[in-house]
Amino acid sequence: MNALRFLMLASLLALTGCGSGSGSEKGRLDRRTQDILANADRVEVFRIDGLEKEPEEEPTATNGPKIDGFPIISTRKDQGKEFARRLGEVLSDDQISKEGPKCFWPGVAFRVRRGEDCIDVLLCFKCDNFYCGPATKDIPRETGSFGNGRLRSRLLQLAKEAFPDDKDIQALQDK
């Protein structure tokens, strides 16, 4: 009976979020996520406070707007269908891996919208991990890693494109 419960739970987990093992042809994103990325109307762009603070820094006000539990620092111009397609290509890449927990202090968030449906993508360029999944009020756990140079470079290019006047994002380097 415990084995049956485990199989049922594993099947449910595989059908949700952006995890691998979802039965999708790409192997990383579930069908709903793939569909939203492939048919997105727009991508909302947010600069977020990943909550990493040096001891001398003042804490960011946490009573303002948030995305997935992280305070929003600023927003930029929405991106279009082509941007969503390129983001989806990177997140579908076979080189995306399932890394264990790292710092996960994301500084960039993309809300990919197809009509009323949406998924959120949070990127941490400190540990090269990301979250991809449904919007949540709580701070999510990372779902994968883009730690190899090629994937980091592609995601960094998208972030720099979305934040052309953000000096911190523009200063980020490929590893």
Image: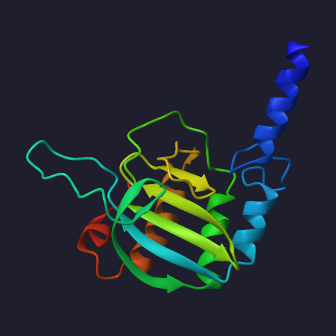
Q: Residue at x 59, y 45 (%)?
A: 143
Q: Residue at x 70, y 80 (%)?
A: 115
In the image, 13: left or right of 46?
A: right
Q: Give percent across and percent down for residue 7.
A: 87, 27
Q: Give percent across and percent down for residue 152.
A: 48, 58
In front of the other: 154 or 23:
23
What is the number of callouts on the image? 0
In the image, 106: left or right of 78?
A: left
Q: Residue at x 34, y 53 (%)?
A: 50
Rendered-image quadrant of the C terminus? bottom left
Farthest front residue in view = 63
Asked if 76 appears above or below 146 in the picture, the reply is below
Asked if 123 appears above or below 167 in the picture, the reply is above
Farthest left residue in view = 56
Farthest top residue in view = 1
In front of the other: 24 or 175:
24
Q: Is residue 25 visible?
A: yes
Rendered-image quadrant of the N terminus? top right
Q: Give percent across and percent down for residue 16.
A: 74, 48
